[in-house]
Amino acid sequence: MKFNTKVIHGGQHHESATGSVNVPVFLTSTFAQKSPGIHSGYEYSRAANPTRQALEDGLASIENGARGLAFGSGLAAIDAVLKLLNPGDEVIAVDDLYGGTYRMFTRLFEKYQLKFTFVNFDDVSKIAALINEKTKLIWLETPTNPLMKLVDIKHVTDLVKGKNILVAVDNTFATPYLQRPLDLGADIVMHSATKYLGGHSDVVAGALIAKTPELGEQLHFIQFASGGILGPLDSYLVLRGIKTLSLRMQRHSENGLLIAQYLENHPAIDEVFYPGLPSHPQFELAKRQMIDNGGMVSFKFKSGKKDDAVKFLEKLKVFTLAESLGGVESLANHPATMTHASIPAEKRAELGITDDLVRLSVGIEDHQDLIADLEKALS
Ligand SMILES: *Cc1c(COP(=O)(O)O)cnc(C)c1O
């Protein structure tokens, strides 16, 4: 099956009792057994629920993995990956990480004796020098949030080939429509399904997709034993969102490029961060690794002033000033005070997340209305 067919049919079956075309929302915690231990395959919804199962099979299908798992949030999914590790293990992570991931690594898991090193993955030879026998996990985000830096996934997975090191990729920004990390040698794909997979800003959800059945089983054990599952109604919403993923990502990408070009030519704007612009330092890698460029665009003001960013954000009408991203509606965000406030100010400055940085999640509205809204707010 090809991708556009998979988002609709991958891992899906008509319901056997009634022929219902969509999987029913199985609002049940438990399942009747004929005799002790003799059951339909479902016992208790923390272990498995048919609606969640339909989503998990769909996730595995679209990421070309062996097993999908759906969690109550993206962070619950990341938490499950870290529980594969033991005290003393080391993790190498991208430095421009989602703020909540950084917070979990440093404030929750360091106290269990996991060691995290945050690095810029521009130069993969630097990564090679950091790897030692304690390194057990490499955590990548590409494109990164909010500076849209790319990591060459194939390069990293080649580097650790034959070593006992897992490579996990947070594929939230790209989605499997734009890039499939497991095909590039990664072991685990993670999603905040709250974003593009759900696509309608109506659910908080997370996902993991494992390349092998063995790794899938280990992660399922962790999910079952720690309990961070996604409920049936939310599972249904994410599954419904995935059906239009291809169509939405096409429009997000078209609008994203038009807006990035508009901003790049605006006299009040300094830098624009978007992998589809030839001015992006990794434009060539973007063309090689991604099918298109998506809807996330960040930019800085020529003045460098926080005040300009704040005034601009207050004036937007079609774009909503809000955290999150990846929904059908356009959102605008001020990383320094909103999504990335959990990163210490010195660290933010070091990374380039300055106070005049604005991040847009470009939706699927008509681009003329979006650009008119930006134009007004900028003037
Ligand atoms: C939102 C987000 C997360 C966290 O997911 P939640 O669903 O909010 O828990 C992780 N990574 C990225 C890139 C995100 O955008």
Image (spheres, rainbow, N blue to C red):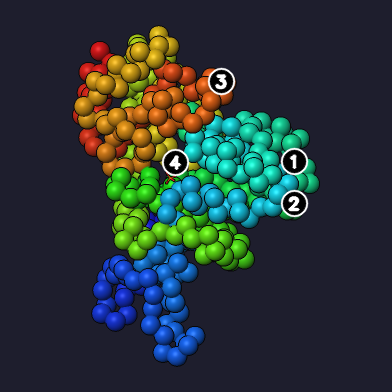
Front one among 249 and 349: 349
Residue found at x 38% / y 78%: 31
Q: CA distance from mark 1 to mark 2?
A: 10 Å
Q: Is there CB contact under 8 Å for labels 1 and 2?
A: yes
Residue 253 vertical placement versus 242 (above, below):
above
Q: Are marks 4 and 1 in contact (CB under 8 Å)?
A: no
> Looking at the image, is mark 4 or mark 2 earlier in the sequence?
2
Label located before the other in sequence (3 or 4): 4
Q: Dot 3, how many residues are within 10 Å of its Cα: few (below 14), some (14-19), or many (20+)?
A: few
Q: Amino acid at mark 2?
A: Lys
Relative height, residue 139 to residue 124 (above, below): below
Left or right, 190 with reference to 233: right
Quote the CA–CA distance across marks 3 and 1: 26 Å
Amino acid marked by disc 1: Ile
Measure the C-alpha gap from mark 3 to mark 4: 25 Å
Q: Position of residue 104 (x, y in %)?
A: 54, 41
* Disc 2 target residue: 163
Quadrant where the C terminus sits is top left
Which badge, 4 or 1, is on the more N-terminal residue?
1
- Between marks 3 and 1 in the image, the one whose residue lies nearer the viewer: 3
Marks 3 and 1, the one that precedes in the sequence: 1
Q: Which mark is residue 131?
A: 1
Label 4 Cα crowd, 10 Å radius (few <14 / some 14-19 / many 20+): many
Q: Amino acid at mark 3?
A: Glu
Residue extending farthest to the right is 133
- The answer to whether mark 2 and mark 3 are in CB contact below 8 A is no
Q: Secondary structure at mark 4?
A: loop
